Image: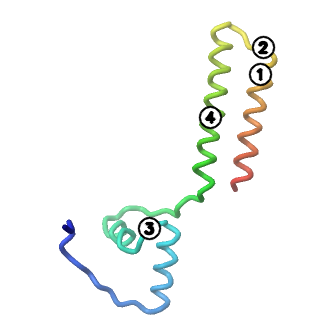
Amino acid sequence: MRTRSRHVSVWMTDEEYKHLKKQVALAGLGIDPFIRNLVQGISLRPKPPETYAALLRELSAIGNNINQLTHQANARGEAVREEIQEAARLVRQVARLVKRSL
């Protein structure tokens, strides 16, 4: 059963419709949810590229690795050269991932 009981119909020019379809595609939504969000005052942004989800997972994993290295160094009261080099390598890897995604 439908939860929405009202239907709205709008006439548009071809140009208006093309613009609407372009905005809908950018937001990654269908026309109905797009218009409902606009009516509710929700600020719509373009859907991020699919590579962003993978980038965020990689950044999270790298951050976890750096956090583990830091925790070990704090437990000992010092960081060994290899740990510092590994942390620096991970930071460089993050920079490369970000540059590739832009």
Residue 86 appears at what percent x and percent y? Answer: 77, 26
In space, the residues marked 4 and 2 are separated at their CA atoms by: 21 Å
Residue drawn at x 43%, y 92% is 13
Residues at marks 4 and 2 touching, judged by CB atoms closer than 8 Å: no
In space, the residues marked 4 and 3 are separated at their CA atoms by: 30 Å
Residues at marks 1 and 2 touching, judged by CB atoms closer than 8 Å: yes
Q: Which residue is mark 4?
A: 61
Q: Which residue is mark 2?
A: 80
Residue 57 appears at what percent x and percent y? Answer: 59, 42
Residue drawn at x 64%, y 12% is 74
Closer to the camera in the image, 43 or 68 = 68
In space, the residues marked 3 and 1 are separated at their CA atoms by: 45 Å
Task: Give the residue furthest to the front.
Answer: 1
Q: Nearer the viewer, mark 4 or mark 2?
A: 4
Secondary structure beneath disc 2?
Answer: loop
- Which amino acid type corresponds to the residue marked 2 in the rendered image? Val
**Which badge, 1 or 4, is on the more N-terminal residue?**
4
